[in-house]
C-alpha cells in the first residue's frame, strides 16, 4: 500500500474553469503554465528535461510513473524544463541498475511540483478536445474560483521569449555525450586536433540527443548560447 504521509492535497484549475484534484508527492507548491500531455510509456526523464516543454505542465497519459527512478545520462538539457509533472500514480519505490535517485527527489532538486492522483484520462481528453490551455496548480490555494483566476492571469505562451530560459549559459564543447565548459572561455578556444566535421550549434533549445547523434557521426560540436 502506498505510503501517503507527507503528501499534500493539490488542485489544478484550467482557464476555462475546469478543476482537477490530486496530491503532491514533492511537497508544498504553487505554479502556473500551459497544460499539455505526452503519451510516452517511458522516458519521463527525457521529457522533463526537454527544452520544448519549457513553461508547460506536462500530463503523462501512462498510468504509472517513477518506477525506474532517475539516472545521470537520460537528459535532453542541463536542467528540468517543465513547470510541473502531472501523473495518475507515482511509484515511490524505484528500481533500475542505473538509477541514482527517485523521481520525487529529482523534482525537488529543481523545485518542480510533482502531482499524482489526477484523473489524467479525463484531463487528456479535455485538452485534446479543447486544446492546450493555461492552468494554475497549488497545494496552498485550494479555492477553485481563486485558482481559475490565477490560471487566466498566467501569461500566454505565444510571444514569450523562451530562448533566454532554455539556452546554455556559456559556450560548451561536446565531449563523450555531455557538454563541458570551455577552459578560458571562447577567446582561448581551439578546435581539438581531430578529423571530421566541426559543428557550431546555436542553442535555441537544442536537445542533447541531437548533439549526441552528431558526435557519434564523427563531428566535433561546439555549443553556443542563443544570444552569441
Image (spheres, rainbow, N blue to C red):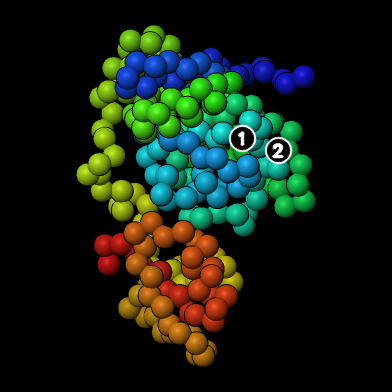
- Circle 2 residue: 67
Whether residue 50 is visible, yes or no, is: yes
Which of the labelled discs sits on residue 70, or is there none?
none
Query: Compared with residue 178, is residue 219 higher up or lower down, i.e. above or below?
Result: below
Q: Nearer the viewer, residue 189 or 40?
A: 40
Q: Is residue 176 left or right of residue 1?
A: left
Which residue is located at x 60 percent, y 47 percent? 43
Number of the front mark, 1 or 2: 1
Quarter residue 227 falls in: bottom left
Pointer 1 with pointer 2, Cβ within 8 A: no
Q: Of marks 1 and 2, which one's residue comes earlier in the chain?
A: 1
Q: Circle 1: is it few (<14), some (14-19), or many (20+) Cα within 10 Å? A: some
Q: Circle 2: is it few (<14), some (14-19), or many (20+) Cα within 10 Å? A: some
Whether residue 32 is visible, yes or no, is: no
How far across and down, in percent of the image, does residue 84 sit?
47, 33
- Circle 1 residue: 62
Amino acid at each position: 500500500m502506498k505510503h501517503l504521509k507527507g503528501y499534500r492535497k493539490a488542485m489544478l484549475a484550467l482557464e476555462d474553469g475546469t478543476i482537477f484534484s490530486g496530491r503532491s508527492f514533492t511537497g508544498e507548491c504553487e505554479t502556473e503554465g500551459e497544460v499539455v500531455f505526452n503519451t510516452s510509456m517511458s522516458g519521463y526523464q527525457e521529457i522533463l528535461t526537454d527544452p520544448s516543454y519549457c513553461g508547460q505542465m506536462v500530463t503523462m497519459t501512462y498510468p504509472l510513473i517513477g518506477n525506474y527512478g532517475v539516472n545521470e545520462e537520460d537528459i535532453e538539457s542541463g536542467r528540468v524544463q517543465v513547470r510541473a509533472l502531472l501523473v495518475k500514480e507515482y511509484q515511490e519505490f524505484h528500481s533500475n541498475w542505473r538509477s541514482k535517485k527517485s523521481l520525487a527527489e529529482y523534482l525537488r532538486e529543481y523545485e518542480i511540483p510533482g502531482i499524482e492522483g489526477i484523473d489524467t484520462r479525463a484531463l487528456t481528453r479535455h485538452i485534446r478536445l479543447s486544446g492546450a490551455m493555461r492552468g494554475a496548480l497549488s497545494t496552498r490555494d485550494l479555492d477553485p474560483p481563486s485558482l481559475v483566476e490565477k490560471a487566466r492571469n498566467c501569461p500566454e505562451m505565444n510571444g514569450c521569449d523562451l530562448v533566454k530560459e532554455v539556452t546554455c549559459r556559456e559556450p560548451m564543447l561536446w565531449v563523450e555525450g555531455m557538454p563541458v565548459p570551455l577552459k578560458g572561455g571562447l577567446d582561448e578556444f581551439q578546435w581539438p586536433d581531430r578529423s571530421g566535421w566541426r559543428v557550431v550549434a546555436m542553442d535555441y533549445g537544442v536537445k542533447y540527443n541531437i548533439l549526441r547523434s552528431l558526435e557519434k557521426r564523427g563531428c566535433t560540436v561546439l555549443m553556443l548560447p542563443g544570444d552569441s
